[in-house]
Image: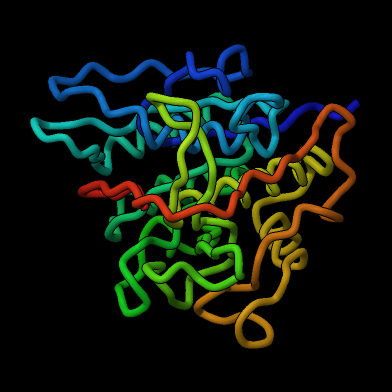
Amino acid sequence: MRSAPLIGLIDTGINLEHEALKEQAIEVVPRRASRADASLRDHGTAIAALLVGRPGSSTPGLLPEAKLIAVDAFYRDGGTADRTDVMSLVVAIEALAERGVRVMNLSLSGPANAVLQKAIEAAQAEGIVIVSAAGNNGAGAEPAYPGAYPGVIAVTAVDQNLNVYRRATQGAYVDLAGPGVNVWTASAKGSGVLRTGTSYAVPFVSAAAGLLLASTPQLDPKAVQARLEQHTRDLGKPGWDPTYGYGLIHMAGLCAPPADLAPVAVTKTQPAALPFEGQTLGMP
């Protein structure tokens, strides 16, 4: 039997007592000592549930049998908005690399930074697939990072009608699309909530990458990206385009899944919820 995927998550804190996450295989790396207040747990809980939410809960995940290693790289420095900085992200990337993850889910975006780019490149050199958000600054905005770094899989969001999210950033770095409008997922303070933003599309591609690597662990990041790009539904103009990339990711037929894995769809058609907003390096 193939082993379950091992996925790394860099995000805010997570409510491990949520009914979708309780008793799931989630390891939380201890937070670094800081004078700042701890992050809120809304965004991290939502992303974790999309990835590994318990079957039978109100918010089942895409790969409920996968193991998740999570790092809270965010904090609040006197305000109510979660934020992070380059060194916090670099430490988080290094911590996940040390634990042997093959896929990192970074549902965040921000400006370019040479130090962060070097950390991303070092992780890629170790065979780690980095999946990040395309950003929510609109079609004419500057590229969002780390999604725009070479080799990082940047994910945009589409709605139930396969239209791109109206606030999604577009550009030459956009690689794939995933459901990211009205996505039903866990709420840190309740059972579930609808979320919208490119953040929520990232787990669909991270799950696909994890499933592929569980089936074919010898693939390197470039091969994983190429395989994912071949398993899409083309949207927009024929072939790649700066709005949808190569199109909507399809997990079906990507590989022969391990016997103990049961991917679950987690989108619902309901009124839109407001996207999470962050600062410094934002949570799309």
Q: Which residue is located at x 63 percent, y 18 percent?
A: 25
Q: Residue at x 63, y 25 (%)?
A: 57
Way the structure is coloured: rainbow
Q: Quadrant of the N terminus?
A: top right
Residue 97's place in the image compared with 173, above or below, is above
Q: Is residue 28 above or below residue 140?
A: above
* Residue plotted at (34% across, 39% down): 89
Q: Residue furthest left?
A: 78
| Quadrant in which residue 6 is drawn | top right
- Quadrant of the image occupied by residue 29: top left
Find the residue positioned furthest to the bottom: 237
Q: Residue at x 80, y 32 (%)?
A: 261
Tell me: 162 left or right of 35: right
Nearest to the observer: residue 17 or residue 3: 17
Q: Position of residue 4 (x, y in %)?
A: 76, 28
Residue 231 point in image, percent of width and height: 77, 64
Residue 189 in the image: x percent, y percent? 38, 24
Q: Is residue 86 above or below residue 182?
A: above
* Count of numbered labels shown in the rendering: 0
Point out residue 238 in the picture as x, y percentages from the top left corner: 68, 87
Left/right placement of residue 281 relative to residue 172 reads left
Q: Nearer the viewer, residue 278 or 90?
A: 278
